[in-house]
Amino acid sequence: MVLDRIAEAYDRMQEELLRESYLLGAGIKEQPEYRRIYESYGDLYSMETITALIKEKLSLHEDAPDEMFDVYDRAIFTLLSLYLSNRLVKDHEEMDRYEMGAVVEVRGKRYPYRMLPLILQKEEKRERRSEIFHASLPIVNRLTDMKLGIYRKALSVVRREFGYPNLLDYHSHEKKEDIASYSKKMEGFLSETYEEYRELAERFFSLLGLGWGEVEGYDIPYLLSGIPFKTRMKVSSLQALRETLKRGGIDVDGLGNLRIDSEIRPKKSPRAFCAPVRIPDEIYVVVKPSGNFSDVLTLFHEMGHALHFAFTDRDLPVVFKRMGRVGTSEVFSFNLQYITDQVEWLSVFVRDLDEEFLRFRRFAYLFYRRRYAAKVIYESRILAGDRWEEEGPRVYEEVLTGATGVHHHPAKYFLDMDWGFYSLEYSQAWEVEVVLRERLREEFGGDWFFKPEAYEFLKSLWSYGLRYPPYRISTGILGVPLS
């Protein structure tokens, strides 16, 4: 079968790409070789192969299971995505090289552009944060131009060769989601949570001496780091993770298929990530500790991805290991991350815990959910057309500032956009995580994350890999339908 040959080759290609991603992101390797990898697998995503796969799907008997048709659809869109990525790989490599080498100079000091999020986290002086941000704007503008060029090329391929009028329509078909309708749902979410969020936001913006709409994007890394609270962990983030999972019956260091890379390297990306190089046999979690409470959140989030892939059933077909919705794994990463928001966990690992810090964590949770809901709305509006430069800055500033009370500088309108509507994946994953967390609390108690039987239940969910999209997990497995 064409499908079987494609799946085998795709698995090998992903192993090479993710190993490359790990080595680059971990700062072990400096020069990317994505183009070489894509070129070596050119036959996999050629139009001849895609056409043959479509013909094989059309030959399925009409009584074939619905899941079989879904398998073919996933494989077809996976190859289309590879075809598109290959057309853009040179541009992506150029953008990555520029970003990796970019340096911001402020008052005679030079900062690697990639390190700015960590630098802003620790900078207590607002004037200094402002200087760093504004000094970075020439780099932001250059990266924006490069990213716009990539999206323009992508749109041209999607229109001329795939037959979709715009990127919104393409991604809606790819995900089998009505993204425009979902953006309306996110408008409802913003309305429903406005009063609670506004009260919390004004409360914690006041820590910076600022009010609603006065906080700037460059203030948020510092505020959300927890530094204003002088939050102190009783142990390191890694020790807290190991102890939490050990109580739950999982020995992280004893998992031969999972490695946490926390070494400090000059070229290491400040953005933590999980690299499932070979599922389930070789999984990496890459983190760059900053010493803030945010380290804990990041580590638990990425470990959620890692455990999901490390406990995926090795006998699953490649389609269910590699070709599913990314939001599926986000359900489990959020689930582990939000352990660190629970009073039953905080009381064990945080010194001098008080009610104000719990309110602060609720504020942070709503900030991110509302920001990504706004991103769904913004991206669905902009990517429904092609007047990105003309409309993007205004709509971005208006929608995201209105949702968060934090001024979003219009210069970031395109850099603050992830390919493939990751904003939708995050938002749906958050919805399903709430259902999963409530189930865990009901069945295993408020301290479920310390109980082996809870992790046995989670392992049963992790074993499905990427077989089910987020809403199917909620509806089909947990029995709670989400519209």
Image (cartoon, rainbow, N blue to C red):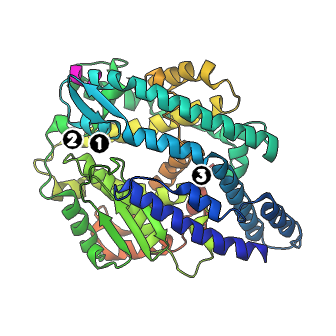
Above or below residue 162? Residue 404 is above
Q: Nearer the viewer, mark 1 or mark 3?
A: 1
Which residue appears at 49% of the width and 70% of the height?
Answer: 461
Front position in the image: 56 or 398 = 56
Secondary structure beneath dot 1 equals helix
Secondary structure beneath dot 2 equals helix
Whole-number angstrom distance, CA of label 1 to CA of label 3: 25 Å
Q: Which mark is residue 482?
A: 3
> Does 37 lie within the magenta span?
no
Q: Label 2: which residue? A: 357
Return the x and y of residue 39 as percentages of the image width and height. 64, 60
What crowding class fits label 1: few (fewer than 14 Cα within 10 Å), some (14-19), or many (20 or more)? some
Q: Earlier in the sequence, mark 3 or mark 2?
A: 2
Q: Is residue 466 left or right of residue 243?
A: right
Whole-number angstrom distance, CA of label 3 to CA of label 2: 31 Å
Q: Amino acid at mark 3?
A: Leu
Q: Which mark is residue 447?
A: none
Front position in the image: 470 or 93 = 93
Return the x and y of residue 187 as percentages of the image width and height. 57, 32
> Which range of residues does the magenta coloring cover?
126-130
Whole-number angstrom distance, CA of label 1 to CA of label 2: 6 Å
Image label count: 3
Which residue appears at 44% of the width and 62% of the height?
Answer: 275
Q: Amino acid at mark 1?
A: Arg
Q: Amino acid at mark 2?
A: Phe
Q: Label 1: which residue? A: 361
Q: Earlier in the sequence, mark 1 or mark 3?
A: 1
Q: Quadrant of residue 215?
A: top left
What crowding class fits label 3: few (fewer than 14 Cα within 10 Å), some (14-19), or many (20 or more)? few
> Does 127 lie within the magenta span?
yes
The reply to whether callout 1 and callout 2 are in contact (CB within 8 Å) is yes
The reply to whether callout 1 and callout 3 are in contact (CB within 8 Å) is no
